[in-house]
Image: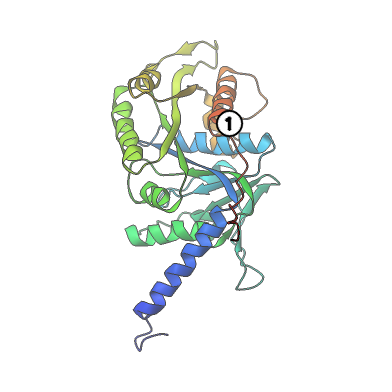
Amino acid sequence: MATKNGGMTPEAQQAKAAQQELAIKKSLGKIKRKILVMSGKGGVGKSTVAVNLALGLAEKGYQVGLMDVDIHGPDVLRMLDMKGKLQGPDSPKDLVPTLKFNDNLRVVSLEYMMRDRDEAIIWRGPLKIQAIRQFISDMDWGDLDYLIIDAPPGTGDEPLTVAQTIPNLTAVVVTTPQKVALADVRKSINFCKTVEVEIAGLIENMSGFICPHCNKTVDIFKSGGGEELARETNLAFLGKIPLDTRVVTGGDDGKPFLISNQDGPAVEAFGKVLAQVELRVPAVKIPEPIQMAKR
């Protein structure tokens, strides 16, 4: 079905697109809840929240997938200290294996498909869209309770593709307390309303800094802005997470701190956030298809 120049005929392209659409529906049919972790601007700790959220749910016994769709700046594998490389399937007809962090957590990121992780990804929209769709259609996610999706900041191609590809998606929006961040978060909230994505709630990250010497809290980024915005927009407030130097060190070392067993206000605060997410986005059983009675 190829043309003389090696391309595909329109008919072949349509058939391939239909086949991928079926594969996406089949894959998503095995996943109970899909959570898009997003932010209005960069630097608010969105990936930190996404990684620790996935790990926290996995530790509770759920089957969890973590999909990094930040095409230009994927950080998930580094934050988990995962160095595995893409392994092809045993048969061309099989799905591509995901990277397993442990028995309860599967991970997919563009980084583990690259020979050089420091190589710049210089892609326009169509390539990014196709890559994200392939993350769903071609990867062996298996049966999941939760799929956590770490999106880049803003409302561009990546979150839009996720919203248009994955039905029944729920968003968790991460912000810091200062006004500049909150202004961008309002755009994320309006984005979700426009594409009809339910918002589980807002998380106020870096809500105060925990001094490593005296253990007191200093509001270097202010405090309470995210909670106030949640009230203004009639959204649930999932909690405040203070900034702890051990969060930064843990992310760099591939040992996430917020779900560790160590003591500290940040760990305690994230535990409450995790409980709120579990409460507001419960891993309910997928309803069985209704069988039409024969007449």
Q: Is residue 183 above or below residue 155?
A: above
User: Which quadrant: the C terminus?
Assistant: bottom right
Instruction: Specify the quadrant of the image occupied by residue 229.
Output: top left
User: Which quadrant: the N terminus?
Assistant: bottom left
Within 10 angstroms of label 1, few (less than 14), some, or many (20 or more) residues? some
Q: Is residue 116 visible?
A: no
Q: Is residue 143 visible?
A: yes
Q: Nearer the viewer, residue 258 or 185?
A: 185
Instruction: Specify the quadrant of the image occupied by residue 208.
Output: top left
| Residue at point 55%, 13% (across, down) | 213
Spot occupied by residue 243 in the image (x, y as percentages of width and height):
49, 23
Element on which disc 1 rests: helix
User: What is the image's colouring?
Assistant: rainbow
Q: Nearer the viewer, residue 89 or 48?
A: 89
In the image, 210: left or right of 141? left
In the image, 11: left or right of 82? left
Spot occupied by residue 163 in the image (x, y as percentages of width and height):
40, 47
Spot occupied by residue 223 in the image (x, y as percentages of width and height):
40, 16
* Residue holding disc 1: 278
Spot occupied by residue 206 in the image (x, y as percentages of width and height):
45, 24
The disc labelled 1 sits on which kind of residue?
A: Glu
| Residue at point 33%, 22% (across, down) | 178
Q: Is residue 95 above or below residue 28?
A: below
Q: Nearer the viewer, residue 271 or 120?
A: 271
